[in-house]
Image: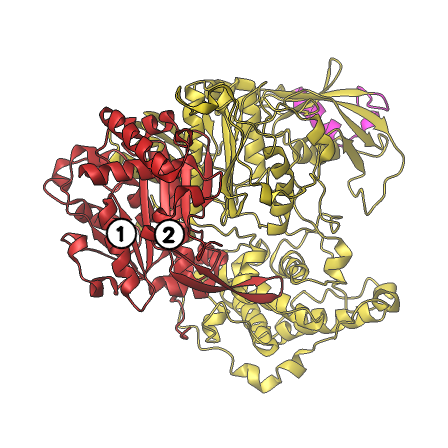
Amino acid sequence: MDGEELTEQETALYDRQIRVWGADAQRRLSKSHILVCGMKGTVAEFCKNIVLAGVGSVTLVDDRIVADESLSANFLILPHENHYNGKTLAEVCCDSLKEFNHMVHVAVETGDISTFGVEFFEKFDAVIISCCSLGKKKLINRKCRKLSKRVAFYTVECRGSCGEMFVDLLDYKYSKKKLEETIECQIEYPSFEEAISVPWRALPRRVSKLYFAMRVIEQFEDVEGRNPGETTIADLPGVLKLRKELCETNSLDESQIPDALLERLLTDTREFPPVCAIIGGILGQEVIKAISGKGDPLKNFFFFDAMDGKGLIEDISGPSTRS
Amino acid sequence: MVGAGGIGCELLKTLALSGFQDIHIIDMDTIEVSNLNRQFLFRQSHVGQSKAKVARDAVLRFRPNISITPYHANVKESRFNVDFFKEFDVVLNGLDNLDARRHVNRLCLAAGIPLVESGTTGFLGQVTVHLKGKTECYECQPKPAPKTYPVCTITSTPSKFVHCIVWAKDLLFAKLFGDKNQENDLNVHSSDTANSSEHSEDVFECRKDEDIERYGRRIYDHVFGHNIEVALSNEETWKNRNKPRPIYSKDVLPEEQTKENGNEEKGCAADDVSAMVSLSLKNPQDIWSLVENSRVFLEALRLFFLKREKDIGNLTFDKDDQLAVEFVTAAANIRASSFGIPLHSLFEAKGIAGNIVHAVATTNAIIAGLIVIEAIKVLQKDNNNYRMTYCLEHPSRKLLLMPVEPYEPNRSCYVCSETPLSLEVNTQRCKLRDFVEKIIKAKLGMNFPLIMQGASILYEVGEDLEEDMVVIYAANLEKALSELPSPVTSGSVLTVEDLQQEFSCSINIKHREEFDEEKEPDGMLLSGWVEAPVDKDNNKPIGNDESTSNALPSMETLEGDKDDEIQETSEVVEAFAGKKRKLSEVSEVTAPDPSGPSSINQNKPEKLDIDDEDDELIISDDWESFTKKKKL
């Protein structure tokens, strides 16, 4: 770690969090660059968290024009037509985020992220994808993995009272203190593609039903060419049919992906603000851990369901990367 | 909402986004720079302004059509009475101290309004729901008492750095800069205490025309040199302990060097005065050497007398007072050096001395989301689905967010179950005043007590009391219990009420002659009032400060408005072990069964997923109370 010290301003502002993760970690954060794609409510929460934490920069990608629905769970958008008229989600969120911490550089990148070359991603230490199709997720994950430097990759998706988060830290080494000793840890992560390719029957018996449900809907959107989040309750028959097929292929009992769960996910497709806050918070913590090198990162899926109130971690990996 | 700090900002934002239309928010604090790393509704330009008001303005910007009523006030004020609370459908706490939480708890019980409590420290957090008669109230479970240390540990035999801090802050700093009339355990006399005569001088008094430089060294030599030598002369004390070494300023800082101390204070204002600046010590994270600490000690002392003379005599330690923090750090470090205890940086010392709570935005955001989920259930009267939720730093059985069913009320809770308490006291020696201060106010958390025996009122506080009653009550305070107009003796039953909290309880009095000075310094023993076991160091009131508890499940907010409490991870994990045990009993019978008609599991209730591989035997600490408790 280079010998640069935190400025007086940083020490004063970050005092309370430095007491949590230390000055070294804070320095590392201040040099980090984060790329975020898909500015919905959960991602807005996440961005707020990392800007407050004092990362070096946050680059936003979302060329969708702000519409009324955008405001539902996103507190970064002020409901004044003049404020957002004609602007993209990234632009409006950028302006709001800057206010939270002047020491963080917040910027907008326009264009379709799937067309950006591998070298584009090299600028970043972490990439967070939301509201993206299955194809895009895999593509960007692949590009990040091609780089010689580690670029942490995360996806996040919230539907109604449920939320899912995925983490790929490639080959992650870190150290931690246990009692008086420092121990070296290493975790190997599968890519998104590798993870979701793990045959369902090979997974531990009690894997969260939400994992399977999200995969069914994800597949449905992929096969039907839908934009993420545009599947609704009207599609239920089609989704149930797909579930049947996938369960047969995977030798999984259909009861592992309950009707009621799928119904819930298709009925309330909008984000639910408390879930955005929870997932955005967990995601924030994970990115801070990965950047600072402090704390055990989760591997590799996190699920939250407001119905049962559980926030749980699932390790979805093949035998080579199973912990 | 009570509290517009760390949890409060996140909570107000999420409530507004979730469709809540009528929100009232109470907070007595103003905004400080150290809040800005997480209280995101506030900006640099808002420093000094009311948190409740600024939070409201910020949220209205993105939800202009809802109603938010801010109160820049203390929730304990009399206007926030039971009638006030009755106006609401639910009360959400985002507080940081035990006192206020107990107060709100009682008002919610009296008003019959559901309360959602919460707390965070660092990466840990929790949310609990309290419904009168249905669940535990906030006070049903014991809350750990604040940590205190025995006097002798502080004055003679420190073994940890915190002991040195307490000495530097509560003894030395207080003696030099605080109220001169306050009792102080610091040895101030230069002659041998065994033969102290009336002529021995108080070393701490600055002599007329004495050079501040001289004075500083005199103090230094007295507390780090002379007092240590005196302590060393008592062989017994050091039989099984490492002996401290006396330190004299001439050995650490030869005279000539100190003359070079400090750049000239370039006409800086009294507030900005700093020994670190003066000595060009830039980094608060550095651990200073004994020499540097000594320089800071002398320079800080000099600057206090030179630049802040008018403050001397009425200062109390304030963690935001840079010069005070510098002085206490230096003094604690020199003492630590003397006793072979590792030195600490100013940053660390400040945290200990100021009871600073470490805090981040993410945990508050998560907790706020969980609070809103419970609040919505309350409004929907979804009685079977309330949960307590714990946010963990390390997963337990794959869970980072662990939901637990609430417990039935504690039948022995003196707050919600009206169980009587017992007090052992020497009724002939104990004055009513001590009873009021130490028991009624301090332990029972009543602010405006009324004390009766049968139909006789022994004491009350109020705004519209008659003159002659006020006189009688004042006189009563100075009387021993057995000498009151209605004598209080063994077997007496007192009824104590706080009218504002609409809370009353009875206390059975039992006379006892003697009390152990070390273990029962108050000369009174209250039982039936459940207090969690405290550190074995707990003896006397010289403590590293006020308020409150910080262990799960009754976690204090170490968050938000005032940064008060210190977190102790080991306590948290320990208290948590009990909780795990209870979780394994939670069945999901009460949760809506997500299985649909086509499911094989149709007729079977869903069980909680438990990884068999993970099965650990976890022994609950409070086994007794665990077996007595029942789930809803």
- Quadrant containing the N terminus of chain A is bottom left
Q: Amino acid at mark 2?
A: Val
Q: Looking at this view, is A58 or B476 the one in front?
A: A58
Q: Position of residue B173 (x, y in %)?
A: 62, 60
Q: Amino acid at mark 1?
A: Lys
Q: Is residue B53 visible?
A: no
Residue under label 1: A138
Please name the residue shown 15% across and 47% down the image: A63
Q: Position of residue A15 (x, y in %)?
A: 45, 57
Q: Which chain is red?
A: A
- Label 2–label 1 contact, CB within 8 A: no
Q: Residues within 10 Å of mark 2 (few under 14, many from 20)?
A: many
Q: Position of residue B96 (x, y in %)?
A: 52, 41
Specify the label residue B392 is tagged with: none
Residue under label 2: A167
Q: Position of residue A300 (x, y in %)?
A: 41, 50
Residue placed farthest to the left in the image? A86
The mark lying in front, picked from 2 and 1, is 1
Magenta highlight on residue B538: no
Q: Is residue A285 above or below residue B427?
A: below
Quick check: do tags 2 and 1 share a chain? yes
Q: Is residue A294 left or right of residue B437?
A: left
Q: Is residue B596 left or right of residue B302?
A: left
The part of the chain drawn in magenta is B468-491
Q: Looking at this view, is B399 or B505 the one in front?
A: B399
Say which label, 2 or 1, has the lower sequence index: 1
Callout 2: SS: strand
Q: Which chain is yellow?
A: B
Q: Is residue A113 above or below residue B141?
A: below
Magenta highlight on residue B488: yes
Q: Is residue A218 above or below residue A182?
A: above
Q: Is residue B391 visible?
A: yes
